[in-house]
Image (tube, rainbow, N blue to C red):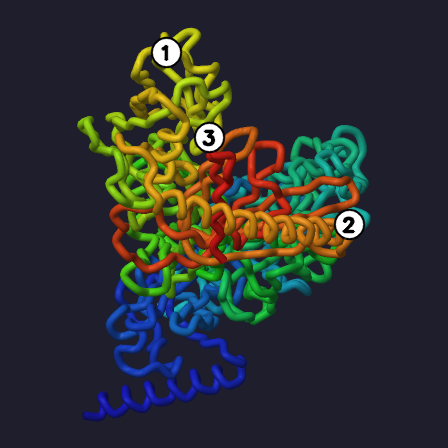
Amino acid sequence: MGVGGAAQRSWGAAVLVLQAAWALGGGQVRYSVPEEAVAGTVVGRLAQDLGLEAGEAEARRLRLVARGRPASVEVSGASGALVVSSRLDREELCGKSAPCALRLEVLLDRPLRVFHVEVEITDINDNAPRFPAASKNISIAELNTMPGTRFPLEGASDADIGSNAQLSYTLSPSEHFALDVQRGEDYLESLFLVMTKSLDRESLSEHRLVLTASDGGRPALTGTVQLVISVQDANDNAPQFNQSVYKVQLPEDAPEGTLVVRVGATDLDEGINQDFSYSIVSSVPASRRDAFSVDPRTGEIRLRERLDYEDIRICELQIEAKDEGFNPLSGHCKVVVQVLDVNDNAPEVWVTSLSVPVSEDAALGTVVALLSVSDRDSGPNGRVRCAVRPPSPFGLVATFAGSYSLVLREALDRERVSEYEVEVRAEDGGAPPLRAIRGLRVPVSDVNDNAPAFAQAVYTVLARENNAAGAELARLWARDPDEAGNGRVSYSVAEGGAGSGSGSGWRPASSYVSVDAESGRLRALRPLDYEELQVLQFEVRAVDAGEPPLCGNATVQLFVVDENDNAPALLPPAGGGPGPWAAGEAAEAGWRAPSSAGSAVSVTSSWSLWARVAWGVPAGQVVAKIRAVDADSGYNAWLRYELREPRGDGPFRVGLYSGEVSTARALEEADGPRQRLLIVVRDHGEPPLSATATLSVSLVEGPEEALAVAGAGAVMAGSLGVGSDGGPSGAAAAATAATNVWLVVAICAVSSLLVLAVVLYGAGRWAPRAAVLAGPAPATLVCASEVGSWSYSQRHSRSLCVATDGAGKSDLMVFSPSCPPPPGPGPKETPQDPPALLDTVSASSVPLAPSFLPAFFLVELQQVWNSQVFTLEARV
């Protein structure tokens, strides 16, 4: 019970001492442990002394970092105690230095903290004193050696320190000799064997004594040396040195061969007994005996090995001058060499902890690395200054003597700099200063702080119609400067479509095109039809894989380029009645009204038509007119008419672009009662498409009969009309007369409008901006002129703009006017598309209607050459 209480009191006292040391040390914990402690010995309860709770040391990864050399202690993970991990030998770790301390750094995570621990290794008496040699021979001349003569002895050395290294000497009992121990100013002991009584060689020629050295440990350890003293005769004067002690200061960087000092001695004898030589008898420490040499004749002591102030600071040499007499005598002196420090050690920098990579959004003040800096020199040569290069974005913060933290001073941006090569430069205060550089590689980890960005805000893509499903239209690319998942971009069609509003006629863009999520390739999901879709505008979204994801958008304008995929379609008669289409001939119609998509389908089977003309009509008489339309646009819809049969010099001809069938010469009875004409309607596409019409022309007796036929089945502009077998009736004649009256009125009205249009056109030429005339609703426009026929069918509105500039350049932009549908079966009613596309056509590229005509008029003009009557239909 008493022993346990004493142990508790002792432990409580130790805790109080540690707490006091902690308070005085400003955050540094100090422990002490004796050397040679067995592995597992508890040095101290580190976790408890640092104020950690139970289990917190293991959770926060309490660990040690040694400076420069492996530590012989470790932290127990479970208890947080500091225990001995390997053999502790104070002499191996520190030599003769005192105190001997292990300076350790203790690291804690979450948050990262550093503590400094100093473990003092106390000395135990585990080394016995040792003499340089097991025996020493000494020669002493009889009679001439007077009592009181002193003979220097080489003392013993003890690797321990403190009281364990405090040596005491004893000499075995002798009536002739005694031991004299002298302690100098630097606590260095000098041993002398003192002769107390004259020697008589004849009574005893050799004396054997034992010199014992005992240390101050408990129990004390001892070492011995045997002194063999030979008594010699004759020479009675020993050499005498000028000084008993020589003191010299020598810089540690002195080169080999440097003269340390010159000692001098004299001998009062004569002859051979006067000659003497110098030698180094011993040195303290003994390991430095070979570092010096003495010239036996001159007494010059020179340096044989370089000295190191960090290893030894004072060296004591015992110099002997021995004469050459029959019984040689010797004199002794002491040379004390003080080593001076020079700046020969560069600072040393160690990285004790490195936390990389550093996130680019790390807060200012984040600790990146822990550094330890030291210099083996002393004084100003050992004072170290530290700096970091480049000076930003990192800086150094001193946390303790010789300890620094590398912290973040400025915000990071991985896209600008992805990795830093940091140099920590240490410089001491010597002259000249020495430097050390420690390089650190600090990579920056990425965060998702950059949204994908397209190379263009708007992409314009041209795609030919009738493309294959899955065909690649374009490739979109968005750049995200982030890395890994934060920079991996996926693409998708965000929004957009074609049609009117959100009704049944509107289709989303995703039904026409798709974009590959990884490559950004834009592909068509189905063949595109120009007659259905001219422009598709939609947005493509690029989204990265970061958390949270960031996105960017780009607008894609897809223009469908027209292909010649629709053959010309022949139109039925404008009146819509059966007419003469099936009279006497089998007719096969290849016309179909424009569909809801705005296209027309043509079947190449020909029409079978017939007409009558009187014999004797002059050349140039219009017999009939072929009317056709092409659902394509531009040159693909520009039609021309050719007479395939009969070939050669026939009685009829066809207008190349008007489609008017007229007489090439006066008709005669030799031409026969009937003529069969095969007419081909061909567009200007590549390759061209065509349709054929068969016209049977019957020759009658007189012009009245032909005129009656023309009145019965009036031929509208662009259609074929044929008469019946009977003559003209009264109703037909009345209708023809009424038509002529209204025709005259219409011609006057058109002339007035023509004059007004010319005036407006002239004013528009000097107006500051172009005039725009527009008419909504779908229509089919057929223009007949001397240069040909241009058919343009489109579901979208067109604008007619006359724009002028200083260079005299004019462009024509046409809005399709509102026109009635052609006679025949009406197309299915569908919602009208909004006027979204503006076509601009050069005035010199495609034959157009005159630019001064109002765009909201549709004018169909038919010339009936046999009656010299013009029929005009106008719709506002």
| Residue 43: quarter of image | bottom left
Mark with earlier residue (1, 2) = 2
State the mark number for residue 866. 3
Task: Assess whether mark 2 and mark 3 are in contact (beta carbons under 8 angstroms).
Answer: no
Q: Nearer the viewer, residue 831 or 170?
A: 831
Q: Which three-letter amino acid code belongs to the residue tagged 3?
A: Asn
Question: From what the image shows, is residue 677 above or below residue 185?
Answer: above
Residue at 56%, 38% in the rendered image = 848
Please provide percent x and percent y for residue 48: 34, 81
Mark yes or no: residue 508 visible.
Answer: yes
- The residue that label 1 is drawn on is 669
Mark yes or no: residue 338 visible.
Answer: no
* Image quarter hosting the N terminus: bottom left
Q: Callout 2: 10 Å neighbours few (<14), some, many (20+)? A: few
Q: Which three-letter amino acid code belongs to the residue tagged 1?
A: Glu
Residue at 70%, 50% in the rendered image = 761
Tell whether 349 sits left or right of 125: right
Secondary structure beneath label 1: helix
- The residue that label 2 is drawn on is 432
Q: Callout 1: 10 Å neighbours few (<14), some, many (20+)? A: few
